[in-house]
Image (cartoon, rainbow, N blue to C red):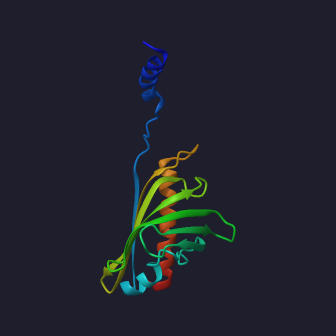
Amino acid sequence: MNVARILAVTALAVAPSLVQADDRAELSVPLSVEVAAAPAEIWALIGDFQDLGWHPAVFSTDGDGGNDSGATRLLTLMKEGGPTIAEELTAYDGAAMSYSYIITEVAPEVLPVDAYSATIAVSAAGNGARIDWQGSFKRAMAEGVTDEAATGAITGVYQAGLDALVAGFGQ
């Protein structure tokens, strides 16, 4: 057996032990709130992927691509020059008042998550509107990050946004 063949066989035998399994749990946060406004009024405020200015943690939103699938946005948090989150729109349905997106880049100290995807949707509820914000993700692979920390961070983001909508429109 030649040396190249021995090395190839050895590499194939050893390779599986070098691959580290991703044993992180798939986590989910579903939150919703009802507000005293027509669904169309809420959608007019939150339905533009390029404008997350209604969220109190977002200082600015810069983006490209409008509401077309593949559009991108860069959220700057808290203040000019603050931490950022890069996102991509994966689905948009203006008639159904819903869009889905993923995070493409975020530092774990900003938001301790990986493999994040979310959907925000508005629907009629009684005499007002219901806003549903649901995300799925894994905890970031950073030292000290736990499932609880990742879930708590996403819950905090969603709750702050939904609380701002309640403050603006009432319940």
Residue toward you, 109 or 12: 12
The answer to whether residue 171 of the structure is visible from this angle is no
**Most distant residue in the top direction:** 1
User: Residue at the spot x=55%, y=63% of the render?
Assistant: 86
Query: Above or below — where is 41 with respect to 107?
Result: below
Task: Pinpoint residue 73: horizontal percent, then vertical percent.
Answer: 53, 69
Task: Pinpoint residue 82: horizontal percent, then vertical percent.
Answer: 67, 66
Task: Pinpoint residue 7: horizontal percent, then vertical percent.
Answer: 48, 20
**Most distant residue in the right direction:** 81
The answer to whether residue 44 of the structure is visible from this angle is yes
Task: Pinpoint residue 42: horizontal percent, then vertical percent.
Answer: 42, 83
Figure quadrant of residue 43 = bottom left
Query: Above or below — where is 39 with respect to 89?
Result: below
User: Residue at the spot x=57%, y=45% of the render?
Assistant: 142
Query: Above or below — where is 30 with respect to 125?
Result: above
Query: Above or below — where is 2 with respect to 97?
Result: above
User: Residue at the spot x=47%, y=82% of the render?
Assistant: 45
Residue toward you, 50 or 108: 50
Residue toward you, 3 or 171: 3
Q: Quadrant of the C terminus?
A: bottom left
Classify residue 142 as left or right of residue 21.
right
User: Residue at the spot x=53%, y=72% of the render?
Assistant: 64
Q: Quadrant of the N terminus?
A: top left
